Amino acid sequence: MKQTTHYTACTISREKCRCFEMLSKEEVELLKENSVNIEFKKKEMICKQGGLVSHIMYVEKGLAKVFIEDGNNTLVLKVVSTGNFVALTSVSEEFNTYKYSAMAYVDTLIKQIDVNIFRNLIKQNAHFAKEVIDILSVNNSQIYGRFFCFTHKQSYGRVADILLCMAERVFNSNEFELPLSRKDLAELTGMSSETIVRILKKFDEDKLIKLTGKTIKLINIEQLLHISDKG
């Protein structure tokens, strides 16, 4: 039987980082001595594209977007939730500047880890290195699937993807207060804010979701999954 892959425009990984579990007690202490926790307010920049790489950043709590821009246009690569890394590709010694920016979607707590310490742990601990490689692989696969959707999925499928993604991978509930603006959703789906508003209103009228201010309740999950799947 032919196996099919369900491609999704979701930007949020379902995987959680387990690499720190692979460290010895001495390595954990070394990491603690060379890391700090920094609070970033909503909409505050966490790192800037083109800036010098000094730290690896891990989301202790919150939600952040990773994106690239050219001065006029912005492309969101992924959304990073609690338990995942921001700008992990900067671990490569080939990169001395950040290749993308990151911004807090909500008030977010970031652990900044000295990049040289992190690189040394990769060199000396094979199990730690494997977990880091696995995270990079998952992130890449997710981004590939996302761009496939941008090419082949219609607007309704993209919006259904994002709503299902938020429910499953961020809030673990079919009812949640959306922390993103309509403009944020437009960036995530590659559409205009007007189109997002129109589609959400249509979903509400068709009783697929219920909108109450910023609160969204997913009512007809089966139909949303169908729309997501068929695009």
Image (cartoon, rainbow, N blue to C red):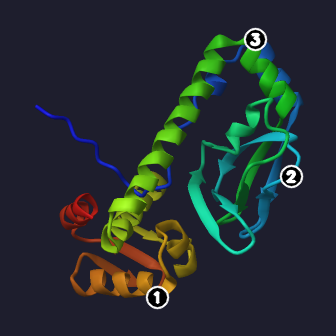
Please rate how many residues cluster around mark 1, counting C-alpha atoms within 10 Å: few if below 14, some from 14 to 19, many from 20: few
Q: Which residue is mark 2?
A: 51
Count of numbered badges drawn on the protein: 3
Residue at image position (42%, 84%) is 195
In this picture, residue 115 sits left or right of residue 147: right
- State which quarter of the image contains the N terminus: top left
Dot placed on the residue nearer the N-terminal end, 2 or 1: 2
Q: CA distance from mark 3 to mark 1?
A: 51 Å
Please tell me whether mark 2 or mark 3 is closer to you in this view.
2
Q: Which residue is mark 3?
A: 124
Q: CA distance from mark 2 to mark 3?
A: 27 Å
Question: Looking at this rendering, what residue extends furthest in the left direction?
Answer: 1
Q: CA distance from mark 2 to mark 1?
A: 33 Å
Q: Position of residue 27 (x, y in %)?
A: 78, 17
Dot placed on the residue nearer the N-terminal end, 2 or 3: 2
- State which quarter of the image contains the C terminus: bottom left
Q: Is residue 149 or residue 166 the one in the foreground?
A: 149
Q: Is residue 180 or residue 115 the one in the foreground?
A: 115
Please rate how many residues cluster around mark 2, counting C-alpha atoms within 10 Å: few if below 14, some from 14 to 19, many from 20: few
Q: Is residue 152 visible?
A: yes
The amino acid pointed to by label 1 is Glu
The image shows residue 125, relative to residue 170, as above or below, that is above
Q: Helix, strand, or loop for circle 2?
A: loop
The amino acid pointed to by label 2 is Gly
Q: Position of residue 99 (x, y in %)?
A: 74, 49
Q: Helix, strand, or loop for circle 1?
A: helix
Residue at image position (30%, 76%) is 209
Q: Position of residue 146 (x, y in %)?
A: 44, 54
Q: Is residue 13 visible?
A: no
Please tell me whether mark 3 or mark 1 is closer to you in this view.
1
- Which numbered dot is residue 194? 1
